[in-house]
Structure formats: C-alpha cells, structure tokens
Image (cartoon, rainbow, N blue to C red):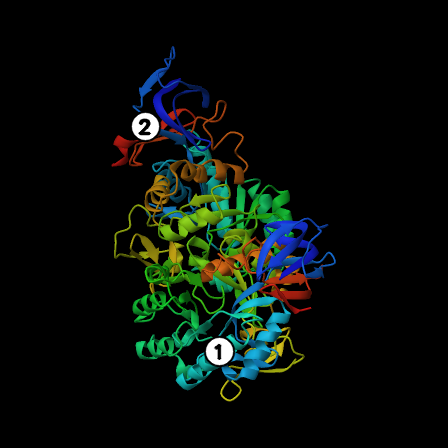
C-alpha cells in the first residue's frame, strides 16, 4: 500500500489537491492532501502533478529498435522507452509489411506482454497498413501495400486471437467496408489512414465501424476539385463529424503550434487524442544525422532535422522522436493548450477509444493505479504501474 | 409622405408578423399586423416575408452585361437585374484590365450611381485585382496582373474620389503594406484574395487594414509545407482569426452544401458574408458561352452545371446566381435558418462597409431598403428608400 501524499491531481478537466492511496494494483481512495494512512508507505509528493498513466496507441520504435524488427527484444526496448516517458499502456504499432512479419509481431507481443505484466500494460498491437492507398503511402513499403482480402485477414485475426487491437487502413479500397464490419465484430478499432477517401467515403466507412482518423493531416485529403466542383476530403470529415476521433501527432513538429491551436478550437479536446508516431531513432537521434527508417531490410534513410525525422528531400516527415511526457510538454507549453486537456488527450480519450476506460485512463477510485508524477516544468518524476513504482527520475539518466 | 407596408413576416433576428411604417425614406416604426394608419400609401405584403434589402459586395455583372463593358447600358442593365433579385446596395466589381478600361468603368460608375440614386445604392466599386500573383489570377488576363503599383492605384483612387469602396489584393506581394495603408486612408476596404499568402503575411496585412477575405476557398492558399513543417494558409486564417470577415460565394456550385454547412458551423454567422461573384449571364437564358470582363477584351468561358467554368473545366469564373438565389441556397439547400441567411447578406455586409448605422436592418430610423419575398424565396417586391422600385 502506497500513499502519494500531497499531489495536484489532474482528472476530469480539473486540478485538485489530493493524496492517492494505492493498494492491490488499484487506486483505493482519493484523500485530502494532508491525509495519513495506516500501514501505507507514504511518499511525500510536495505538490507534484499526478495524472493517469499515459496511453500510447501509435508508436513504431524507439531507442534503436522498431516493432518491425519482429523480435520480442526489439519490442521490449520500444515499450520500455515509452514507459520511461510515462506510458503505462502501450500498443506496439506495425508498418506495412508481409503477413508473415505481422504474425511475428503478434508472437512478439504475446511474449512481451507477459514479460512486462508487472511493469506496463501491453494489450495488443496496432496494425498500420497493408491496406492503404499507394498514393498516400507516406513512406510505407510499397511492395507490401495491397487491398483487404478476407483470405488473408480472417486467418490473421484468428491467429492473433485478440492481440490485434487497432487497424489503420484506407476505407476507399475495394473490400474495406467488409473488412471494417469484420474487425468491428472482432473488437478491433478501425481507423482511417493513408487514404484518399473523400468526405462521403469517410461517412460511409463510419457506418462500417471506422470511427477514428489516424494522424490527422498526414497522408489524407483536403478539398479537391473534380470537374471544377469541390469535393471534401477526410480532413473536412474530421472537422465536421462529431462522432469521429481525431488522432494527432503531438510532437510539436507534425502539427505545429498554430495548427494545434486551430485543431483544438475547431475539433476540441473531446474528440482528439495525442500520439507520438515515434520511430526507431527516438531517444538516440542526433540533429543532422542520417538514420534508418522502417524495417531493417529496407535500406531507407531519413534525416534528423529540427527535432523530427524527415524524408531526405525534406518534403514530409517519417515520424517523430518524441514520447509520452514530451507530447504533453509540446502540446501544453509550445502550443499553449490547457494542461488538463492535454492530459485528457493522452489518458481518458485514448482509453475510451480502446475501450479500456472502465479501468484505465482516469484517477478514480477503483481504477487501476497507473499514475505519473511530474513537476511544474513537466519533468517526469516517477511512474507507477498498478500501484508499483516502475520508473523514477534518478534512474532515467542511466 | 408616409407608406404603410402591412401584413408581412419581418425577418430581422427572427421572424415576426407585423407591418412597417415608412416615412421620409426611413423605417419609422414596426407595428402589429392589423394597423390603422393615416399613411398615404398602403402596400399589402400579403403575408410575404420582408427583410432588409440585400447588400452585394462582389458582382461583376448580370443580365447580359459586365461592369467592365463600361457603358451606361451595362451598368443599368446589370444593376437593374440585381435589383430584381432584391439587391438594394451594390458594389460593381472589376476584373484585371487596362488602365483605360478601369478609367472607363469608373466614369460609367459615377454617372450610373447618380442616375440610379433614387432606385438603388451603387455604393462604390470593388476592384478585384490586378494585384495578384499570376498563379492565383483565377483566369484573369495575365497581361494586367502585377504587384501593387502605386502609380496605378493612386491615379485610379484620385481619378474618382469616393468611387472605390473595396479592393481585393494578395497580401504576400511587395508593396502591400503601403497599398493597404493607402486604401485605408482613403476609406477603401482592402480584402485578401487571389493569394498564396501564409499566416505570416496575413498577420502582417492585418496591420495594414486587411480585415476581409475574398471568396473563401477560391484562389487561396491552404496548408503548405516548409522544410516539412506545415504552415497555415489564408484558408486556415479564415477559420482561425476572429477579427477577419469571410466572404462566401453562395451559388450552390462553388461550395458543396456539406462544405458550406461546415463553414457555417466552424465560422458562424457572425463573420460570414454571402456574395454571388456573378458574371454576365446571371439572370439571363444564356446557357452556353460567357465573356468575363469587357465585351472587347474579356476572356471566354462556358456555362455548364449552372456555373461559369474555365474552358478546360478545371475551375470556375463566377456564378450565375443573384441576390435572393443566394439566400435560397443558404436557407433551403444548406439548411441555415432564414434569419441568419438574411443576416449574412444584410447586416454583415453593412458592417463590413461601415454603413450599419443606416442599412442592413429593419429598425426604426434605418433606410427603408426592403426585399419582399415568398416561401420559395422568390422576390415579390423591392423598396428602396421607402419607394416601391420593384412591385
């Protein structure tokens, strides 16, 4: 039993002074800031912020490893890196690849999830790809881009046996709507990604389970003209449909502060959530360095510049080098969004999207005691997973 | 002389049944439906709607005429067609042209303004161009497209003092600050249009009087990437900046209904202004060809699907809708409440021009410029300064 005494608790859009009593993996009680608890180990927090553990559902790599290395070791490295930035629930994310590689990632996830059971929640994977638009590949491996074929995905979903939690595809592809129905029936969250879909196609896809737009603004259409007439794209769908979730890469680069403020105003914190879309070199990248991106066998390079991994021609980005608390910092300090709402977009909202909000994503009595502590400058101090300290600041610099 | 306009549904903020007492060209009082009056003239509105007369800030022509034709026939013909569609205050609009054509149309404007002063308010001209980047000229004659040229705009403004009310230019061009300041000093509203500006240039332009965006989505920048980073364009500024007015072409073609509804949802009726951007064939039976600009030197387009297109059909030259047609599109097709649709073509343009102390409302003391219309939003009558000009 641990008592986190005197924290500023961020929950439900408010910041309130409190103490958090954690036992048996669960937040047992929210007490006054000066509370005492018998038999509890007391941690004096001196007014640190306490937020729910962060939930990351779109990250490919970190610290030299990539999910598409397809090994438990690599996946574990990625998971641990994000944990050390406050991510207590993590969905390893694939890139477009072969069926065989995806199966190996699923295998790795089963292993890693069990290995990390005491440190971090790894409920399953997010598949980004295969079934995407070639024109909107965004640096994905063209060789493996294909259309949804039940002969492939039905056995894969069966093989995964619940370990696929989210799937990002282009809903305008032939067979995508059937795919959407199938995934939805199997509890997989379907997202619109790497897509040339029009507004109307997104609307149709929403009737087939697609309720989410992957990395808003990246690899999707805005208004295009057909025979002179304007046709709306997925971006307009994102602004217009109140029952569509909007995923935002919160590294401060993909969506610069002005655009972030714009999104916040017109979409709002109720429908947005933040992700890193981090790549292999998160945590190791040096400014100006040429780096490998994607799978090892692909021999594709990017360049680290201005704090993000760019295409060599600088026309676009491969992904971010940010993680967890850094997303909070970029969104709150750089873009100026309210702290409570930034937290919400990294906790309650992703929990709701992934349907784990009955036990994750909130600081409420009875919810899992996943807690991050950080100071006024948004420096991470300590991470608790199910009531146990799994990372503290003094070990971060190892 | 008093006039009683009785038995009307008054569209002002909401809709209420009533009658209007008019005296000395002004609205004197808003009265109940059943009203006894000593008015010399009584007009029975027969339960039709009445709104403030429409204010059109962007129209190149109609009725087979273009204001660039530069003749009285063209001005009267086009303006009268607008009047029949409920437009009581009008900004005849240019395209890029030679200085000689500009001077000719200014002359024609001045004469027509005086000649029509008891019938319609030709408030001032709207110069659309020629200070645009060539890639955003929107089909205008490239020979005349340039950066702001003080020799040209100073001459035009001093040639016809008070005759230019609005000027659309691209804020990224060199000399724009001086141009904006000069316009503002001379009571001319500078508008942002035909532009590749980024948010940086929009912000700078706002320091020099630009408070208005010309035809949203047409010929304007959206997000671009600089060294990979996204930079907001004029389109995003329209959504993001509360101190900018936003003009929307409401012909039902330039913007699809879902997009218009989204614009209305995100920007709201407080900042939107409806315009036609109408061109020569508006209000006529012409269904095939169009000359945009003057008869002698205009460019050619085609009419198809109810809109004027470039010959290659890649974009539009302008609309063939007018006045009440725009209200109909907004209210019936897009589903915007009628009072808000009216507001965006009365109160809002009046505010943009700074004449909202006398035009744009049905209120005691305001000019009795009125549009009467039925449930289908067809015009059944127009009053200008209290006088029935279309009946």
Q: Which residue is mark 2?
A: A48
Tell me the chain of label 1. Answer: B
Which numbered disc covers residue B109? 1
In the rendered image, residue A159, in percent from the top left (x then y), is placed at 57, 44
Determine contact: label 1, label 2, CB under 8 Å.
no
Farthest residue, direction top: A38
**Quarter of the image that includes the C terminus of chain A:** top left
Residue B300 drawn at (x, y percent): 54, 84
Residue A359 x, y percent position in the rendering: 51, 29
Residue at image position (38%, 69%) is B170
Kindly indicate whether the residues beneath marks 1 and 2 are on one polypeptide chain.
no
Report helix, strand or loop for mark 2: loop
Locate residue A79: give its quadrant. Answer: top left
Q: Mark 1 Cα within 10 Å, few/some/many (few <14, many 20+)? A: many
The one nearer the camera, B122 or B143, is: B122
How many circles with numbers are drawn on the protein? 2
Taking depth in this image into account, of A63 and B149 the one nearest to the observer is B149
Above or below residue A143? Residue A110 is: above
Residue A175, visible in the rendered structure? no
Q: CA distance from mark 1 to mark 2?
A: 70 Å
């Amino acid at each position: 039993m641990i008592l986190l005494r005197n924290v500023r608790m961020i929950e439900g859009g408010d910041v309130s002074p409190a103490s958090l009593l954690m036992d048996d993996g669960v937040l047992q009680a929210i007490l006054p800031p000066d509370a005492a608890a018998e038999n509890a180990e007391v941690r004096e927090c001196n007014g640190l912020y306490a937020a729910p553990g962060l939930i990351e559902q779109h990250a490919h790599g970190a610290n030299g490893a990539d999910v598409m290395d397809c090994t438990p070791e690599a996946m574990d490295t990625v998971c641990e890196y994000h944990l050390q930035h406050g991510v207590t629930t993590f969905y390893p994310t694939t890139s477009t690849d072969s069926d065989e590689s995806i199966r190996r990632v699923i295998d790795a996830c089963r292993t890693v999830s069990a290995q990390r059971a005491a440190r971090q929640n790894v409920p399953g994977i997010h598949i980004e790809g295969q079934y995407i638009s070639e024109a909107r590949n965004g640096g994905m491996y063209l060789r493996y881009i294909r259309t949804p074929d039940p002969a492939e995905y039905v056995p894969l979903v069966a093989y995964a046996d619940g370990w696929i939690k989210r799937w990002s595809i282009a809903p305008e592809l032939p067979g995508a709507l059937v795919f959407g129905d199938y995934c939805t029936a199997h509890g997989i969250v379907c997202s619109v990604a790497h897509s040339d879909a029009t507004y109307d196609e997104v609307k149709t896809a929403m009737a087939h389970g697609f309720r989410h737009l992957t990395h808003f603004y990246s690899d999707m259409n805005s208004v295009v003209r057909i025979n002179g007439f304007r046709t709306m794209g997925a971006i307009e769908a994102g602004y217009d449909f109140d029952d569509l979730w909007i995923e935002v890469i919160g590294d401060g680069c993909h969506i610069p502060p002005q655009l972030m403020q714009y999104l916040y105003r017109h979409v709002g914190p109720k429908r947005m959530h933040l992700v890193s879309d981090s790549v292999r070199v998160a945590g190791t990248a040096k400014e100006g360095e040429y780096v490998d991106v994607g799978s090892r066998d692909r021999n594709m390079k990017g360049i680290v510049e201005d704090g993000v991994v760019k295409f060599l021609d600088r026309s676009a980005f491969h992904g971010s080098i940010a993680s967890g608390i850094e997303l909070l910092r970029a969104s709150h300090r750089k873009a100026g969004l309210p702290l409570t709402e930034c937290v919400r977009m990294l906790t309650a909202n992703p929990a709701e999207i992934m349907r784990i909000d009955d036990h994750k994503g909130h600081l409420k009595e009875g919810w899992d005691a996943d807690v991050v502590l950080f100071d006024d400058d948004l420096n991470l101090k300590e991470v608790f997973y199910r009531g146990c300290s799994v990372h503290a600041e003094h070990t971060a610099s190892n | 002389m008093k006039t009683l306009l009785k038995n009307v549904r008054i569209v002002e903020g909401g809709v209420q049944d009533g009658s209007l007492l008019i005296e000395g060209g002004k609205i004197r009082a808003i009265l109940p439906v059943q009203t006894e009056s000593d008015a010399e003239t009584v007009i029975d509105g027969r339960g039709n709607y009445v709104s403030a007369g429409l204010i059109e800030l962007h129209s190149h022509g109609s009725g087979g005429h273009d204001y660039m034709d530069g003749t009285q026939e063209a001005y009267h013909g086009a303006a009268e067609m607008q009047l029949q569609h409920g437009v009581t205050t009008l900004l005849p609009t240019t395209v890029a042209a030679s200085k000689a054509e500009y001077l000719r149309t200014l002359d024609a404007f001045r004469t027509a303004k005086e000649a029509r002063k008891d019938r319609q308010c030709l408030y001032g001209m709207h110069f659309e161009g020629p200070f645009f980047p060539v890639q955003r000229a929107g089909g205008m004659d490239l020979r005349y497209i340039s950066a702001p040229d003080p020799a040209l705009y100073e001459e035009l403004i001093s040639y016809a003092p008070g005759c230019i009310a609005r000027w659309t230019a691209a804020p990224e061009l060199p000399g724009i600050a001086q141009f904006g300041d000069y316009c503002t000093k001379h009571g001319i509203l500078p508008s942002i249009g035909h532009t590749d500006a980024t948010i940086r240039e929009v912000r700078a332009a706002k320091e020099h009087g630009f408070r208005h965006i010309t035809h949203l989505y047409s010929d304007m920048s959206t997000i671009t990437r600089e060294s990979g980073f996204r930079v907001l364009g004029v389109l995003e500024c329209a959504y993001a900046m509360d101190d900018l007015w936003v003009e929307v072409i409401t012909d039902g073609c330039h913007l699809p209904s879902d997009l218009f509804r989204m614009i209305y949802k995100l920007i709201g009726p407080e900042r939107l202004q409806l315009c036609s951007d109408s061109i020569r064939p508006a209000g006529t039976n012409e269904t095939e060809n169009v000359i945009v600009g003057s008869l002698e030197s205009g460019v050619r387009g085609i009419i198809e699907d109810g809109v004027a297109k470039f010959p290659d059909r890649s974009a539009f030259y302008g609309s063939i809708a007018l006045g009440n047609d725009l209200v109909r599109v907004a209210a019936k097709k897009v589903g915007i409440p009628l009072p808000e649709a009216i507001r965006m073509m009365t109160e809002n343009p009046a505010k943009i021009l700074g004449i909202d102390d006398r035009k744009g409302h049905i209120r005691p003391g305001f000019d009795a410029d009125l549009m009467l219309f039925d449930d289908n939003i067809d015009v059944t009558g127009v009053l200008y300064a209290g006088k029935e000009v279309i009946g």
